[in-house]
Amino acid sequence: MTPRKTWVWRETVHRDGPTPAARPVTRVAVAVAIANPCVGTQASDLSVLEALGPQLAERYLPEAIALLPGPAVAYGKAAIVGTLGEVEHAAAVLHPRLGKPMRALIGGGAALIPSTAKVAAMGARIDVPLSHKDDAWHFDELDTLTLGFEDAPRADEILVILVLSDGGRPAPRIDAGRTAI
């Protein structure tokens, strides 16, 4: 797998509207535009795409981890399939095998990694859901990061996005720190 292009994106949030952050929250994303080997086929065997998930995590996630000032607390993943592909192509990359190496690299992750996928044209944006890595019911980390890149995915590509955060929403005030009953 040789990507056409990679992006690494980092933001640190100090304020959410008029409310100062409880502490600065840093979110990091790595996005990779890869050729979709299943374009134009009706393949029922998507194992070639399934194999890409762990490769992407192992190759690109360490760079994202290095940009976080603290340990990863929340995570999420997403994919946009170019218009010649199918949403199932994104599912094959994101679900069966990507999670295990992602969890290993961040040192844990008992909760499911939230994800989303869609088929869209180049330049489309996607809302990447984030949640706490160990407790999906920990409300402070339920968040969304919207990303898109002007030249991806091309019609025959898949844009895969992995996101990590060292905290939750910048100024949580709805039962902050409380878990669901």
Image: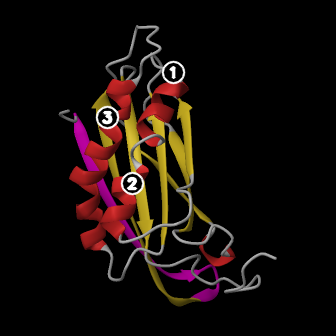
Q: Is residue 175 left or right of residue 34?
A: right
The answer to whether marks 3 and 2 mark residues whose Cβ atoms lie closer than 8 Å is: no
The three-letter amino acid code for the residue at tag 3 is Ala
Tell me the SS state at disc 2: helix
* Residue type indicated by callout 1: Glu
Q: Which residue is mark 1?
A: 86
- Is residue 57 in the magenta section? no
Query: Which callout, 1 or 3, points to the residue nearer the camera?
Result: 3
User: Residue 46 sits in which quadrant?
Assistant: top left
Q: Residue furthest left?
A: 2
Q: Residue 47, labelled with which disc? A: none
Per the image, label 3 sits on a secondary structure element best described as loop
Residue at 69 percent across and 70 percent down: it is 137
Q: The magenta stretch spans which residues?
A: 4-20
Type of residue at label 2? Answer: Lys
**Closer to the camera in the image, 128 or 46:** 46
